Amino acid sequence: MFNSLSEKLETAFKNLKGQARINDLNVANTIKDIRRALVDADVNYKIAKEFTDRVKDKATGQKVINAVSPGQLMVKIVQDELTELMGGTEAPFNVSGNPAIILIAGLQGSGKTTFTGKLANYLKTKKGKNPMVVAADIYRPAAIDQLTVLAGQIGVDIYAERDNTDAVSIVQNAIREAKSKNKNVVIIDTAGRLAIDEVMMTEVANIKNAVNPSEILFVVDAMTGQDAVNTAKAFNDRLDFSGVVLTKLDGDTRGGAALTIKYTVNKPIKFMSSGEKMDTLDVFYPNRMAQRILGMGDIASLVEKAQSQYDEEQAKRLEKKIRKNQFDFQDFYEQLQQIKKMGNLKDLMGMLPGVGSTIKDIDISDDSFKGVEAMIQSMTPYERLNPDVIDQKRKTRIAKGCGKDLTEVNAFMKQFEQMKQMMKMMNKMPMGMGGKMMPGMMRK
């Protein structure tokens, strides 16, 4: 995400390398390059100019302290300004009310229905809510079918009336149903159009007036760039929505919408979404997004994703086995499953500082682990728990069982043994106080 913008900003900062001070002369080309990078990312020129003017005002004349280069100082200034441009801080999400009512709006194809499912899953699994989703798109039968499938996947109730052509009455009936079933959140998926029209705007405004939602979220396809910002402004003039959701951030995203939508409509970005899986929804943190755009990674989000899959008891058992050098293929397989649950592998690697630009042209599939998984699944339970018993004859059988060459199986076995040796060396590292390993070190 935002690879092109990140590369151009990195190039711009190189102009300041080796300088002792940021001044009008050496900052001019850098500011020009930053402005050009923003415009290329589909940021409105007026906004890009205001942004770079603020950066220039803050940067010019600043002394460079020891161990901090002018380039690093400029990165810090740009990071602060990007963070402020995108909202400054995390925006609160209001789920008050009994039930709390959340209205989803946007153009057709922006990802509203998928987001509705993701939000329901997020509120259920991470906030302990009991949500119901409502299919209020009376024009597109496929939207009802899609939401029904998604609701089934995540285990939440759905309310739909296929023969009712009055969206307002559908929503009102749904809220009564939710109250009778003790649902504490109702998420309404409304109809979209390929373009803004009066019928759509009137209908969604009527729904808003009828149910008084605690949150109105406008869903934006991040790949549409500045057009998305213009659409958001038109919706906001009519609905006065409370927040924005950026979808399809795993696509060819230039960044214009994410960078300028807050500035244009003065409404915060509350969530960002990528992919089709129901667990790929994240709270939007402006400071973290600024860090990712500048190639600094996003360790905080990576840690949160890891913690969401963290099993305390399993980690303790694994730590004991590693201490005794008893790590086996079953342990390895279980760790792979936890990594896969954290999300898209390329996105996860992109959260590591300095890694994003190095893997931008590399195709890292979510199926990367399938070959390894197939090898482990071709082992007997005894072999998984006792790697040392796997001789050449067993390797040949495993290779046939998973459809791999014997050389691939041998290579995997060698890598696994090297990993075990590394773990064994970790056990010999200096201990903490009292000769014992510091708590949690091995688990981490």
Image: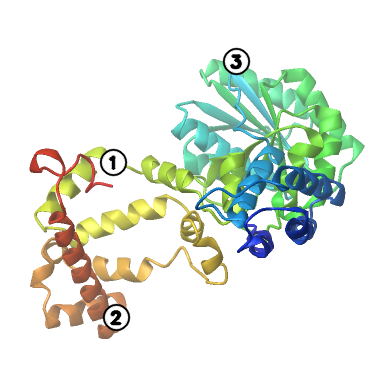
Residue 46's place in the image compared with 87, above or below, is: below
Residue drawn at 60 percent across, 63 percent down: 18
Three-letter amino acid code at disc 3?
Answer: Gly
Which residue is identified by label 2?
408
Q: Which residue is mark 1?
A: 311
Residue at image coords 76%, 24%: 208
Asked if 107 appears above or below 3 in the picture, the reply is above
- Give the mark nearest the N terminus, 1 or 3: 3
Who is closer to the viewer here, 16 or 93?
16
Image quadrant of residue 115? Answer: top right
Give the Cα distance between marks 2 and 3.
57 Å
Q: Position of residue 125 (x, y in %)?
A: 44, 34
Residue at numbered disc 3: 97
| CA neighbours of label 3 inside 10 A, class few (<14), some (14 to 19), many (20+) | few
Q: Amino acid at mark 2?
A: Glu
Please indicate whether residue 438 sits to the left or right of residue 216 in the image: left
> Is residue 187 visible to the viewer in this orientation of the structure?
yes
Location of the N terminus (image quadrant): bottom right
Q: Amino acid at mark 1?
A: Asp
Label 2 element class: helix
The residue lying at 76 percent from left, 43 percent from top is: 57
Kindly identify the residue that appears in the image at 37 percent across and 41 percent down: 307
In the picture, measured across the screen, residue 365 lies left or right of residue 306, that is right
Tag 2 and tag 1, C-beta contact below 8 Å: no
Question: Which is more toward the observer, 131 or 308?
Answer: 308
Q: Residues within 10 Å of mark 2 (few under 14, many from 20)?
A: some
Task: Give x and y (percent) for residue 259.
Answer: 72, 46
